[in-house]
């Protein structure tokens, strides 16, 4: 009977060892699956962040381009208005330009003469 009990203990011990080996393998598989899933989430979030940054950059560039076009159009209108004003009043424009130039020259000369 002692021999039977010893065989049962050995069999139980072997069964426990097999269960532990199986458990170790299962835990390893779970960790591997968790690591792969985590890496996939990180890749997804990195991709989403890159897409968000690109979208914000594109939106900023669109806003900047619209502002540039608007400023350019306004500048062109102002130049056209000035050309029209000079065309409508050429003598006044020449006298005004001469007067402004004269005043600037006197200011820069500092009244030395």
Image: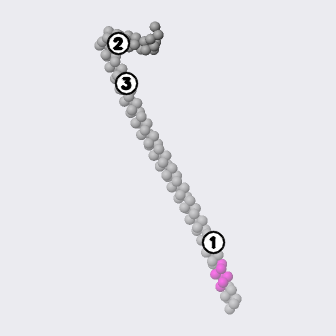
Q: Which residue is mark 3?
A: 75
Q: Which residue is mark 1?
A: 21
Residue 88: where, in percent of width, then height?
A: 29, 13
Q: Quadrant of the N terminus?
A: bottom right
Report if residue 84 lies within the magenta region.
Answer: no
In the image, is residue 37 above or below residue 102?
below
Name which residue lies at 44% across and 43% down: 55
Which label lies toward us, 2 or 1?
Answer: 2
Q: What residue is pinned by disc 2?
A: 96
Q: Is residue 20 visible?
A: yes
Dominant SS type (magenta):
helix
Q: Residue furthest left?
A: 88
Which residue sits at x=38%, y=13%?
100
Task: Give me the residue at 32% from left, 9% from top.
Answer: 91
Magenta range is 8-14
Comparing 33 with 51, the one in front is 51
Judged from the image, the secondary structure of the residue bearing numbered disc 3 is helix
Q: Is residue 101 visible?
A: no
Q: Is residue 23 left or right of residue 76?
A: right
Q: Pointers 3 and 1 in contact (CB under 8 A)?
A: no
Of residues 106 and 74, which is closer to you in this image?
A: 106
Local secondary structure at mark 2: helix
Residue 101 figure quarter: top left
């Amino acid at each position: 009977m002692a021999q039977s009990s010893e065989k049962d203990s050995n069999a139980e011990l072997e069964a426990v060892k097999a269960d532990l080996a199986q458990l170790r393998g299962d835990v390893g598989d779970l960790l591997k699956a968790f690591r792969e899933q985590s890496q996939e989430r990180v890749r997804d979030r990195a991709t989403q962040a890159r897409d968000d940054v690109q979208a914000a950059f594109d939106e900023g560039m669109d806003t900047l381009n619209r502002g540039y076009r608007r400023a350019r159009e306004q500048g062109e209108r102002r130049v056209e208005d000035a050309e029209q004003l000079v065309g409508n009043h050429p003598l006044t424009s020449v006298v005004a330009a001469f007067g402004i130039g004269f005043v600037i020259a006197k200011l820069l000369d500092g009244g030395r003469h």
